[in-house]
Image: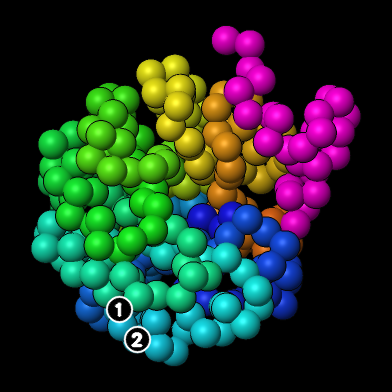
Amino acid sequence: MTAAGTAGYGAEFHPYVDLSTIGAVVTKSLAPYEWPGNPAPRLHPVRAGMMNSVGLQGPGIGEWLERTLPEIIATGADVVCSIWGRSIEDYRAAAEMLADAPDSVVAVEVNLSCPNLEGRGGIFAHDPALSAEVVAATAACARPRWAKLSPNTDRIVEVARAVTEAGAEALTLVNTLLGLTLDPSTLRPTLGNGGGGLSGPAIHPIAVRAVADVRAALPDVPIVGVGGIADTFDAVELMAVGASAVQIGTALFAEPTALARVRDGLVVEARRRGLSSVSGLTGLAVL
Ligand code: SIN
């Protein structure tokens, strides 16, 4: 799958990869209303990845359902709609707006972990009870809900347990890590909002650890692994420690076709190991 926020809201990647041949297109997170996001610059490359502080800019779910979703459906892709809000009521409203979405919207990813809103106090996924409340409020979307969690906490297992008990059918692990970069001449932050979220190869081992820890604690909960996948083995690693599926994000900025390369690489890797399907890679790690 594409990772939320790295492949737009719609069919932008279809010219590069036939979107009907990947697991799903995961949209950039959408709120129940239009949202302007953070001041530019919003992206900044770093040695082992990328910093972002987009601030969840978006057209709102209503506009997306009407204007953008039909374009993705026309590609034959399955769609996972990522949602966000500033309050529990926002998440509830977002879920209600998706209740009658077409069947191509196969799941809703509940983004509890954006690091770029109203300072660091705003990450729902650092608080198990609050995260559970948000997930419980999104039942009206009437499709499987995946809770996207934050690596910026030592409570990820606790949060994972709380959100699954509240109704999340799967967990997406992980979002970006809090970071800060400075411009060499001005010594001011490179991003318009100050700090941001670090993604890309630098965070891959952190994602692998998070998936392994959550899988050990909650072996029956499906996990979608995300964090710094650039090559097939990165995806194999996340699956081996317990992910049932993976998302690719930062790598797509430099190489949009990485989606197809890694997808095909997984098939080859499964065959090489004598497995009848890619899903056989899940849980193979010897820990
Ligand atoms: C952003 O739009 O600022 C990033 C979203 C996220 O990390 O969840």
The stretch drawn in magenta includes residue 226: no
Q: CA distance from mark 1 to mark 2?
A: 6 Å
- Residue 119 lies, in percent from the top left, at 16, 52
| Side of 221 relative to 281 (left or right) | left
Asked whether the viewer can see residue 24, the reply is yes
Eyeballing the image, is 146 above or below 39?
Answer: above
Return the residue found at the far top.
Answer: 287
The stretch drawn in magenta includes residue 278: yes
- Magenta stretch? 260-287
Q: Quadrant of the C terminus?
A: top right
For disc 1, does the CB lie below 8 Å from ligand 1? no
Mark 2 surroundings within 10 Å by alpha-carbon count, few (fewer than 14), some (14 through 19), many (20 or more): some
* Amino acid, disc 1: Gly
Kindly state the secondary structure of the residue where label 1 is placed: loop
- Residue 269 lies, in percent from the top left, at 81, 34
Residue underneath mark 1: 60
**Nearer to us in this view, 168 or 31:** 168
Residue underneath mark 2: 63
Q: Residue at x 71, y 30 (%)?
A: 280
* Amino acid, disc 2: Glu
